[in-house]
Image (cartoon, grey):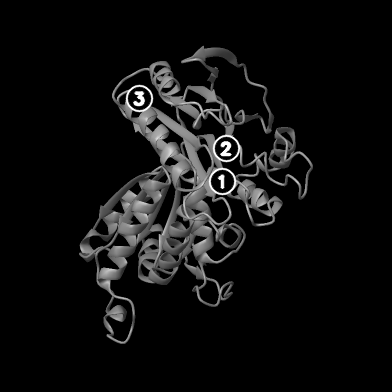
């Protein structure tokens, strides 16, 4: 096992006028062989019928793999099961499978979806493909040894069809998509943000009235990056040194949230805490600096904004243009947790802040705990390893 991991993020838009998306993505983690399987299925047509077909296809594949069947058996079963449309002469659902094995190898199995785009060292990489026939259907298969920063972009055919008759005569060709995304690959964006950027451009090319469902799923191979965040002082003052010692002994960057907490950290480190007087965002208190700590912010108000951004990240990711560029405490935390961190350790103090006991204030102890719980769940859904320790 190496120190690499897979960052996976996807984004979809619906056919104009449809409430359901005809594409479906399933992500399956398998602990027994340390593998991750991503299935992107595209149902024929749009609306309810396409949604059912794509969901069924991805669920069949992911369930069979989870039960221990080989990828080849799963593909052959699905290929033989899916009927052919008598009118169009094409399958009722197409699919792309990416399997990451122990973060060492990647397997691609592709049936009738646009071919996966792969970037290595920041440029397009023409990976090897083997053509085979399963269940009477042509399948492309690949096996690739992984390197750090390898990036894969899988998509449904709604992406290269974007702009037909509007911006382009024959749609947005694969080579155009490759050129469009290439300068962005090594900037440091997350997989979800890369998918969002590409999908926003697809939506623009459709004139914001997509003529087909479109989905982008991006996989980035990156090194594991630990991150440590301390939020609130311990309930027992005598545990302060123990909490600080454990926190600062951890590998990776260190974030301290809260005025009292940062004062305790400054005392423990024997360094001055220097607050900033600059309100980058009028709704978010300023940050501070403390030697030995990578970021010092205010507590509940800042973390509540981080939670808001995290929830949006898991939905449409519309706020990424804000937190990816702003310099307020919440945005800085988001960049560290969403874009850099893969393994996050929360050190949460249970002390009750007397300032939060005013019934006229919207902040109390239970809200603080709820922020931690909800943010932890959001980060886990992003694919992060999260550990929460209470003091």
Secondary structure under tag 3 reads helix
For mark 3, what is the residue?
Answer: 65
Q: Nearer the viewer, mark 2 or mark 3?
A: 2
Question: CA separation, marks 1 and 2?
Answer: 8 Å
Task: Give the x, y percent position of residue 260.
Answer: 36, 70
Residue drawn at the location 42% of the way across and 30% of the way down: 37
Contact (CB < 8 A) between labels 2 and 3? no
Instruction: Please state which of residues 125 and 146 is positioned toward the viewer in this rendering.
Output: 125
For mark 1, what is the residue?
Answer: 213
For mark 2, what is the residue?
Answer: 156
Question: CA separation, marks 2 and 3?
Answer: 22 Å
Instruction: Please state which of residues 331 and 312 is positioned toward the viewer in this rendering.
Output: 312
Q: Nearer the viewer, mark 1 or mark 3?
A: 1
The quarter holding residue 264 reads: bottom left
Residue drawn at the location 44% of the way across and 64% of the way down: 308
Contact (CB < 8 A) between labels 1 and 2? yes
């Amino acid at each position: 096992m190496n120190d690499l991991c897979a960052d996976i993020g996807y984004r979809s838009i619906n056919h104009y006028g449809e409430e359901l998306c005809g594409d479906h993505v399933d992500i399956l983690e398998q602990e027994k062989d340390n593998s991750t399987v991503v299935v992107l299925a595209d149902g024929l047509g749009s609306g309810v019928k396409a949604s059912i077909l794509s969901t069924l296809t991805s669920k069949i594949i992911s369930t069979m793999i989870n039960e221990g069947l080989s990828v080849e058996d799963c593909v052959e079963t699905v290929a033989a099961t899916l009927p052919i449309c008598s009118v169009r002469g094409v399958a009722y659902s197409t699919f792309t499978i990416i399997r990451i094995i122990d973060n060492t190898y990647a397997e691609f199995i592709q049936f009738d979806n646009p071919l996966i785009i792969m970037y290595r060292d920041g440029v397009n990489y023409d990976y090897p493909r083997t053509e085979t026939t399963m269940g009477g259907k042509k399948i492309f298969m690949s096996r690739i040894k992984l390197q750090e920063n390898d990036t894969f972009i899988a998509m449904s055919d709604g992406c290269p069809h974007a702009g037909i008759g509007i911006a382009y005569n024959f749609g947005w060709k694969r080579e155009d998509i490759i050129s469009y995304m290439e300068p962005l690959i090594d900037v440091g964006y997350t997989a979800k943000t890369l998918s969002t950027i590409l999908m926003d451009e697809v939506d623009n090319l459709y004139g914001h009235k997509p003529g087909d469902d479109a989905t982008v799923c991006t996989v980035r191979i990156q090194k594991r990056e630990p991150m440590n965040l301390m939020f609130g002082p311990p309930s027992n003052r005598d545990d302060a040194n123990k909490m600080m010692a454990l926190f600062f002994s951890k590998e990776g960057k260190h974030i301290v949230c809260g005025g009292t907490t940062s004062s305790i950290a400054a005392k423990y480190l024997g360094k001055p805490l220097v607050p900033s007087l600059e309100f980058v965002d009028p709704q978010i208190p300023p940050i501070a600096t403390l030697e030995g700590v990578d970021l010092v912010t205010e507590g509940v108000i800042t973390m509540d904004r981080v939670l808001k951004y995290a929830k949006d990240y898991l939905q449409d990711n519309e706020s990424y243009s804000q937190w990816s560029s702003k310099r307020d405490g919440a945005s800085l935390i988001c960049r560290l947790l969403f874009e850099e961190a893969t393994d996050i350790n929360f050190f949460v103090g249970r002390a009750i802040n007397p300032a939060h006991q005013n019934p006229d204030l919207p902040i109390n102890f239970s809200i603080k705990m709820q922020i931690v719980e909800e943010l932890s769940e959001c980060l886990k859904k992003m694919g992060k390893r999260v550990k929460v320790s209470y003091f």
